[in-house]
Image (spheres, grey):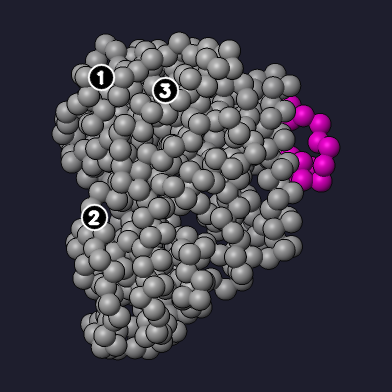
Amino acid sequence: MSEGTCSSMSFATRFDRLANACCTLLQDAGTTPEREAHIALAPLHLRNAHPETLAHYPDLFTAKASWRDRLRARLGPYILSVLAILKKQPDWMGDPLPKNADILFLSHLTDPEEASTGRDLYFGDIPAQCAAHESTRVVVALLNHTQVSPDALRTLWNATKIPRIVLGRLAGFRQEWRMAERLREAVRNLPESRSQGELEIAAFLKATPVTGRSLTALRTADQVEKLVRKLRPSLLVLTFEGHAWERLAMAAARRAHPGILCLGYHHTILFPKTAASGWKLGGGYDPDGVLTAGEVSAKWFATETALQGTPVMPLGSVRRQFDAPSVRSDFQPDNLICLVAPEGILGETKRLFQAALEAAEHSPDLRLRLRLHPVLSRTLVESEMPELRDLPTNVKWSVAPLEQDLALCDAVLYRGSTVALTAGLSGLRPIYLRAEGEPVCLDPLEACLGAWHNEIGSGKALSAALRRETSQQAREALQTYCQRYFTPPRASALREITELIHTSSNSTGTSHDARTSV
């Protein structure tokens, strides 16, 4: 993705230097005593230039970390170890597992409600489609991103046709303590630094050698290894966004079952400076093939130099499970309704909702609908923004399905949310909120909007941006771009890319023993 007009050359240079250093240190991990713990060091997996990513590097991209942040980083692993004594969780809980499986999907539980409904925001009904084909045996394992206890999840749990399990978030005290020690040892044994960027990231790691994300990577790898050893699947399909746990999960699966194929599914948008997903690390830490949400990201992965030779194919997205309507004609200036759609990130949610309240006060005739990402609760957001408990009359919370919101609204106010693309499919006018001092533009629609790129710096400018004239041609171009970004999901892509991998392996003389029918 282009950095666009919002980018800063000094920031770009700084980011590229650090990204190159991180990639080099990960690739050099084979020279360290324990490569797995080295690869597990989450800060080495620099994902992109999203503010949420950069916030993990306070001394490198943003202001100096506060003493509270430093204390939290230092004590966090020890607190987790103590909590493990009191709240140790099993490796997984959920449905009874079959003796064997053909395909193991590794997805995410983002909302406790999904425990009862079986809804999957990442793979949708693709696992069910696979299971319906020639009696393919499918299991879905979920990383738990909720704050709900295992007992509460058991109460909510409903079995579905596809066996599902949720991975535990805390191992026993001994394992948690040992993982933290492995990470500290990995930092002590970092390869000798050769560049300024490597010196910077090495110093950063030595200041905070153990993070919750690094512990999650090691814990998840252990769980996946046990699961694959038990089920012996021939295919592992997992989300692939540049996280440390993804790399370790693939290597762990290959240890447990050397013939397994590992497919990484990039299901989201390409943020500026996408980095770690495009790196090739070697040693079993790379996907055999990359699946994407659509054609735009497939093109990006296919043209990444480091990934040349890795098959890439669109799997499609659950966000295209309903048909896009015809592009609507120009909006009426009165009674406009704007959907406010943040990502599942508290800071981004607060920024957008604050702009919405500002817009509501400045333009009383404008109506706004606040839509929360499923991973965040209204209680949490209101505790951070008490002003949301008493909304103006022209601002409402949305509790409707996304399709209903899209049919009701005329426009969408967004930053990095994938809802912007879904709204573009439905013909809503996109309005991007730019944060003050933002080094890069997060707008996933910037590449296609051109002169129709509506960017505002505050809520006061929202009403005027909504009334700006645009052409039907621009609207149709936006919808076409969104159709390419999120293509309809198709389970057959798993079979096609698997066959492509085997064909490629045979032509190069390499070997993959795994076979699957999907």
Give, as a three-letter code, the residue at label 3: Glu
Q: Nearer the viewer, mark 1 or mark 2?
A: 2
Identify which residue is drawn at 20% across, 19% down: 135
**Dot 2 surroundings within 10 Å: few (below 14), some, or many (20 or more)?**
few
Q: Nearer the viewer, mark 1 or mark 3?
A: 3
- Quick check: is 204 in the magenta stretch? no
Give, as a three-letter code, the residue at label 2: Asp
Q: How far across and down, in percent of the image, does residue 321 sit?
A: 25, 49
Query: What label does residue 348 carry, if any?
Result: none
What's the CA distance linking mark 2 and mark 3? 30 Å
Q: How far across and down, in percent of the image, does residue 374 sit?
A: 30, 53
Residue 350 visible in the current orientation: no
Give, as a three-letter code, the residue at label 1: Arg
The residue where tag 2 is placed is: 323
What's the CA distance linking mark 1 and mark 2? 30 Å
- Disc 2 secondary structure class: loop
Which range is magenta?
189-202
Q: Classify 397 as above or below 161.
A: below
The numbered mark, 2 or 3, whose residue comes first in the sequence reads: 2
Find residue 493 and report its image quarter. Answer: top left
- Quick check: is 199 in the magenta stretch? yes
What's the CA distance linking mark 1 and mark 3? 18 Å
Find residue 340 and report its image quarter. Answer: bottom left
- Residue 28 is left or right of residue 134, and the answer is right
Identify which residue is drawn at 76% across, 41% down: 198
Q: Classify 39 as above or below 451.
A: above
Query: What label does residue 499 carry, if any?
Result: 3
